[in-house]
Image (spheres, helix red, strand yellow):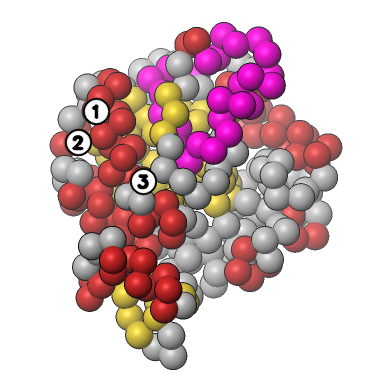
Amino acid sequence: MNSPVLTYYDLSPDVVAFSTTRRGGYSVARYGGFNINRWCGDDPAAVERNRRLLCGELGLASDDRLIIPHQTHDTAVFDVSEDFLAEPDVARRDAALEGIDALMTDIPGVCVGVSTADCIPVLLYDEVRHVCCAVHAGWRGTVGRIVERAVLAMRNRFGTHPEYLRAIIGPGISLQAFEVGDEVYDTFRDAGFDMEAISRRYDKWHIDLWTCNRMQLEHSGLRSDAINTVGVCTYFHSDEYFSARRLGVSSGRIFSGIMIKDNR
């Protein structure tokens, strides 16, 4: 069986929220077995077969309802609108998704998601406005406060009130595994983060990206009990989830996605 094995999240009855694991699929070696990211060096044919498997698993009407941006560790948030979905030119659609690290939409039956392999995926859902968002928060995006920017973008575009948002902080590298140089520590400090809360000194500095993003969500107005940190470290569980620090950057990527159900 090549069917993908997904980790589903109990975010809301109105949405399907999940992260892919390494199980299932057609990719091999360090991309094995399930990878749908086409920018990490995997065999394009395997990526397309895996993509079709995921569309089948999610019951998507067509392949163009699975939206994956080309991330660049920046803070741009993109609205997957009806106009975007109606664009027939694949090259134009790809160009619109270039340099995007967060996707939001209010359209049912469209899966938006982000790719990670130690970075932190954050999934958001507005239970009142019925809007979802997927955020890629690597350390650079975290320093740039991308989750705060995503919440603000949802508020500006859809009228989202943060107190009605629910969030999942998905699998990513833990404090214990995320060793950084002094320059990265200094970047967080200079950006105004509470270093006592998000860092520890062992042989070198370690940064807690889970806590950092949780604090940003709370600062944005989310209730603390509406934020669920999965707590799975990709570095220590690289047999189940892709980890660039364990496997190298030429390896697969986790896809964390969210889709509003058609029957909400």
**Disc 3: CA contacts within 10 A as few (<14), some (14-19) or many (>=20):** many
Magenta extent = 84-109
Classify 2 as above or below 246.
above
Give the CA separation, mark 1 to mark 3: 14 Å
In the rendered view, does 114 fall on the left or right side of 11? right
Q: Would residue 21 appear left or right of 143 to someone viewing this image? A: right
The answer to whether the residue labelled 3 contacts the one labelled 2, judged by CB atoms less than 8 Å apart, is no
Q: Is residue 96 magenta?
A: yes
Find residue 155 and name its label.
1
Kind of residue at badge 3: Ile
Q: Amino acid at mark 2?
A: Pro
Residue 186 picture quarter: bottom left
Q: Secondary structure at mark 2?
A: helix
Q: Please give the name of the residue rendered at 76% of the width and 34% of the height, measured from the top-left corner.
A: 48
Depth check, mark 3 against mark 2: the one in front is 3
Question: In this picture, is 103 found above or below 118?
Answer: above
Q: Residue at x 61, y 26 (%)?
A: 95
Instruction: Name the foreground residue: 244 vs 33.
Output: 244
Residue at screen point 69% across, 44% down: 39
Image quadrant where residue 13 sits: top left
Q: Does 174 sit above or below residue 106?
A: below
Q: Quadrant of the N terminus?
A: top right
Secondary structure under the numbered disc 1 in the rendered image: helix
- State the residue in front, 102 or 2: 102
Q: Which residue is mark 3?
A: 146
Labels 3 and 2: the sequence-earlier one:
3
Residue bearing mark 2: 162
Q: Earlier in the sequence, mark 1 or mark 3?
A: 3
